[in-house]
Image (cartoon, rainbow, N blue to C red):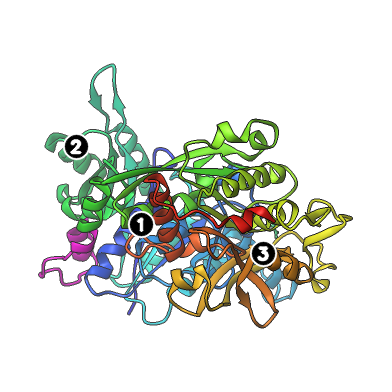
Amino acid sequence: MTRFIFVTGGVVSSLGKGITTAAIAVMLEKRGLKVSIQKLDPYINVDPGTMSPFEHGEVYVTEDGYEADLDLGHYERFSQASIGRHSNATTGSIYLEVIRKERAGDYLGQTVQVIPHITDAIQTAIERGAAAGTDVAIVEIGGTAGDIESLPFLEAIRQFGLRRPKGQVMYVHLTLLPFLAASGEMKTKPTQQSVGKLREIGIQPDVLVCRCEQPMTEAMRNKISLFCNVRPEDVIQEQDVETTIYEVPLDLVREGLDRAVMEHLQLDNSAPIDMTDWEDLRFRWANPEHQIEIAVVGKYIQLHDAYKSIYEALAHGGARHRTKVNFRKISAEDCADGDVASLLAGSHGLLVPGGFGERGLEGKIRAIQWARENQVPTFGICFGMQAMALEFGRHVAHIHGANTTEVDPDCAAPLIHLMDTQESIDDKGGTMRLGAYACRILENTRTAEIYGRDLVFERHRHRWEFNNDFLPQLEDAGLKCAGIHEKGNLVEVLEISDSPFFIGVQYHPEFKSKPLSPHPLFSAFIGAALNFSRGTTAAVPSEVEAR
Ligand code: GLN
């Protein structure tokens, strides 16, 4: 029988509900339980695929090709849970389903209403989210208690608890204890009011997790307990972390969240929980031996969340090498107009992330040219890989008019183009090449050396593809194909094989990197950047430059 934990949030948004949810998953897995995690989002977009990264951060892609909220990235980085399209539902997807059924006449003349039809559909989605064999399903409700748009979700999870035996469903509410500098104290009133909002609609939280900058005093704990009707030992503090979000599971275990959850779900917690691997990670993270700086040249550089998984994956690679990775975030447009050398000088590696559209492409190409000519380790992802092909095509292989048809449909040399089968697609939502595809890694390549395997599965999110007509010219000039999707004969990896690191991948390896198992490409990239910073780089052979 699957047990359910509902995680809600109060007071303000951006409290780190996704990370707290992921941390709960870590604890339960340490207890040997099989966990699933799901996010319910109150917005009307059917999925986050069409949302601007400026507004909503990156679009995270799951193995099964679902375009998801970045919280699903936290879930995968922290836990072993299998995350896919079943792991997310939005107001839009729920309504779409109900309206489709209504149009099909499935409701047999009933008046279709929020209660029970929408709330039933939400409960069906929750059940679908818990894969077969799941011991505990954790469900995070997006938004903040008191929002109009989250009401149907809160109503649905209330009903869900009502229909199940005690001990099978619990509610965890995350709140904020704001610190008032003027009076020098933390305040509990917002927490009381947000719990009040939940209780108004019939949800009594079992556990409160209180985000705070300062430690919570016993007096505060007792006050919150009394006013919110939650046992004092179930009022858990979650203080700001010192170095990394990956400390959160350790902190929350120490504060008793593991005990509280196990007790409420009537699960055995007599054995001590073993968090050694996370302790080791924290130690490595907090005590780096080296520091490097990676330049990230992208279009959405102002917002950290827009490249969330990339920054995380770089940091994972850093932790593996006991290296603190500092980011130099550079707008691609500045590289197009400005002095690339001075923008990039002193960085130890260049990462060019994915992107769409014209803005920034030329800047990315200039940055790559500078990095290649100065033998700075270079890692291109998706649009970044396409930009590497264009840079090399233009400046080393001297292919006149090399471009992508995404930017210039009539260019003389479409190195990056749409496949014939894609030309007729007009819809913007869910129509790209999405999710995991097999990639055969070719022998005697740098990429093969790094992966140590000849077949990998990596995730995609793009429309345009490398144009094989130009491969011989690029290979002759020194940019080799190092990985292909055999079924479609699609180039997935390009590299300069004798460079320490000049690799572009059509896929998004950042989605598969975890703090406890960094992605090999990110780990190798950081290793190359570290070598570069120490001046131990083997120079790129001159014939590559000379062509
Ligand atoms: N715009 C490019 C394409 O669609 C790259 C997409 C990306 O970087 N995610 O092919």
Does residue 139 appear in this view? no
The earlier-in-sequence mark between 3 and 2 is 3
* Quadrant that contains the C terminus: bottom right
Asked where in the image residue 473 lies, by quadrant, the reply is bottom right
Q: Residue at x 30, y 60 (%)?
A: 24
Q: What residue is shown at x 56% (from left), y 31% (from top)?
A: 342
Mark seen at residue 96: 3
The label number, if any, that marks residue 66 in the structure image: none
Judged by depth in the image, the label closer to the viewer, 3 or 1, is 1
Of residue 29 and residue 405, the one placed in the foreground of this image is: 405
Residue at position x 70%, y 70% in the image: 100
Residue 169, compared with residue 188, is above or below; it is below
Q: Which x, y percent locates residue 32?
A: 24, 75
Q: Is mark 1 within 8 Å of ligand 1?
A: no
Amino acid bearing label 1: Thr
Earlier sequence position, callout 3 versus callout 1 = 1
Q: Specify whether 101 is left or right of 442.
A: right
Position of residue 303 measured from the top left corner of the image (x, y, whole percent):
53, 39
Pointers 3 and 2 in contact (C-beta within 8 Å): no
For the record, the magenta segment spans 257-278
Can residue 297 be seen? yes
Q: Which kind of residue does numbered mark 2 sit on?
A: Met
Residue 1 percent across, percent down from the top left: 32, 80
The residue under the point 29% across, 63% down is: 26
- Is residue 308 located in the magenta-colored stretch of the structure? no
Please report whichever mark, 2 or 1, sits nearer to the chain's N-terminal start. 1
Does dot 1 land on a helix, a strand or a loop? helix
Query: Could you say whether the residue bearing mark 3 is in a helix, strand or loop?
Result: helix
Determine which of the numbered discs, if any, sits on residue 216 in the image: 2
